[in-house]
Image (cartoon, helix red, strand yellow):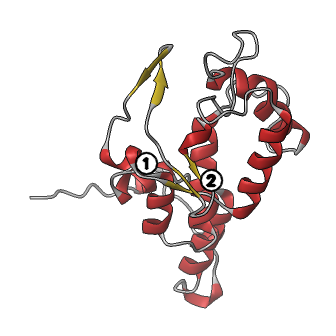
Amino acid sequence: MWSDIDWKKLKINIRRDWVGGELGRPKSRASKAPVEMHETLAALLQAWRQQTPYSKDADFLFPSFKLHGKQPRIGSMIVQDYVRPAAVAAGVIPEDCPRFGFHNLRHGLSTFLIENGHDPVVVQRMLRQSHVDMTMHYVHNSHKARNAQAQFIERFLPNGGTVADVEEPNDAERVPVRVQ
């Protein structure tokens, strides 16, 4: 709701959630913590507040217009109507991508940030996850990361070889290893 935004501190206070068509309480301490808001987002939200007929403090930021602002729009409808078309237009996903939503965005964002050198603990806190290992679970092994890893390993190969030069032994050449 608009009353949840602290415009001076640039924070969004999380006081409730919307699950299964019902208002409820956030499920964990991490999910109750205020969310930092960038100045750009604050400006966009203020512009939206000027446009929407539901701009009172007790109104939802993104209400269902069909239900006259009495309920928030559900996430899947926001994805279908706005997020997915924007992702297709930006070339983030192909038009025939079968699944795309907020969860995919979390995975993609965590991968992008970690690959570009951001501290996993900072990413964990931004994603509001309770443990950094959960954040690392969200990070996907990209072509860029695999290539960087191969280049690192190649430094240790004899005679300037490459990972591509190392052949996988066939089954006849494999030597079983017993661990005791």
Q: Position of residue 126 (x, y in %)?
A: 51, 58
> To which residue does mark 1 refer?
171
Q: Is 84 located above or below residue 105 in the figure? A: above
What amino acid is at disc 1? Answer: Asp
In the rendered structure, the answer to whether residue 28 lies left or right of residue 56 reads: left
Foreground of the two, 167 or 24: 24
Q: For the C terminus, which image quadrant?
A: bottom left
SS at badge 2: helix
User: What amino acid type is highlighted by mark number 2?
Assistant: Leu
N-term mark: 1 or 2:
2
Q: In the image as oriented, which residue stretches furthest toward the front?
A: 56
**Measured from the top left, where is residue 136 in percent x and y?**
44, 56
Can see residue 153? yes
Q: Residue at x 43, y 39 (%)?
A: 15
**Farthest-out residue, right:** 89
**Residue placed at 58% from the left, 46% from the top?**
106
Which dot marks residue 109? 2
Q: Nearer the viewer, residue 98 or 37?
A: 37
